[in-house]
Amino acid sequence: MKREDFLSLIGFGFISSSFLSARSKGSARPVTDCNDPITPPVPEGPFYKDEKMNRYDITETKKGTPVEYIFKVEDEHCKPIQGAIVDIWQCDNEGVYSDFKQENTENKTWLRGYQVTDKNGMCRFKSVFPGWYEGRITHLHGKVRVKNTTVLTTNFFFPKEMEDEIYKNSASLYPKGINPISLKKDIELRVDKDAKRHDALLMKLEKDHQGNLTASYTIAVV
C-alpha cells in the first residue's frame, strides 16, 4: 500500500468523533481547576508500534537539531500523576518513521520510546527536532497510560515561527526545507472549524543562551 493511501485511511469521520468527545458543553473547551486545557486527542495514525523501550534518549543514529522534550502529566485538579507512561514517536529529519515496511525501515527503532513520570508528574526525552511529510504539519505523536489504561492519544505541535527558523538554519539537516502544509490542509486537523485544538497542543519551544533547545508541555488528562 502506498504511503498516501495508508495515511488517507485515518480520515474525517474518526477524527470528528474523537475530537468532539473531548469538548465540554457548548463550544467551550474543558480546562483543569488551574485553567490548563484538558489535552485534546488526535488519532493515532498509521505509524505507532509499542516497542516497549523505556529510554530517555530516543535519537539513536538520527541527525537533526537536538531537542529535549519535557512533559508534565496532571489530572483535572492540577495534581501531578506519578507513574504515568508517556510513549512518544516521531518521524526523522526526512519525514520517515522507523519499523514499518512501507517506510523501508523494518526492525529499526529510532525516535521511539517511553518514560515513566516521577512524583512531580515529570518525564523527559532526548531527541532531534522532527522533519515533516506530505499532508501533515510538523508534529510529535504521544500516548499516555495511567494504571495500564490508555487515557490519551494525541499530537504535539510547535510554534511555526521557531519551527521555520530551525529548518532554515539547519538546511543541511532538513533537506525538505520549511514545511508548507497549512492547518487547513492537514489531514488530521482540517475538519476542525477553528484552530483551537492545534493551539491547545502547542509545545513551549525555548532556546537557552547556549543554544540548547527544549520543547515542554503540560498534559492534562481526565
Image (spheres, rainbow, N blue to C red):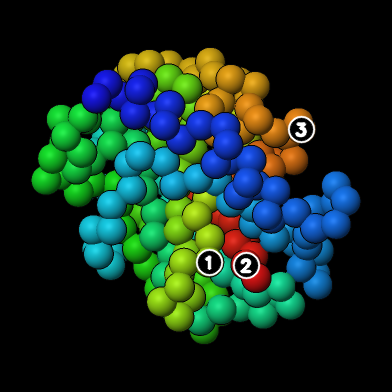
Q: What residue type is labelled 1?
A: Val
- Identify the element where label 2 is drawn: loop
Q: Distance between the residues labelled 2 and 3?
A: 22 Å
Q: Position of residue 115 (x, y in %)?
A: 37, 67
Does residue 139 appear anywhere in the picture? yes
Spatial separation of the CA atoms under disc 1 and disc 3: 24 Å
Q: In which quarter of the image is residue 190?
A: top right
- 27 left or right of 9? right
Q: How crowded is mark 2: few (under 14 residues within 10 Å), some or many (20 or more)?
A: many
User: Which of 82/171 is in front?
Assistant: 82
Quadrant where the C terminus sits is bottom right
The amino acid at mark 3 is Asp
Task: Decide: is 106 above or below 144.
Answer: above
Whether pointer 1 and pointer 3 mark residues with C-beta atoms closer than 8 Å, the reply is no
Does dot 1 land on a helix, a strand or a loop?
A: strand
The residue at the point 16 percent across, 34 percent down is: 101
203 is higher (above) or lower (below) than 159: below
From the top left corner, tell me how far across and down residue 175 is, in percent: 33, 17
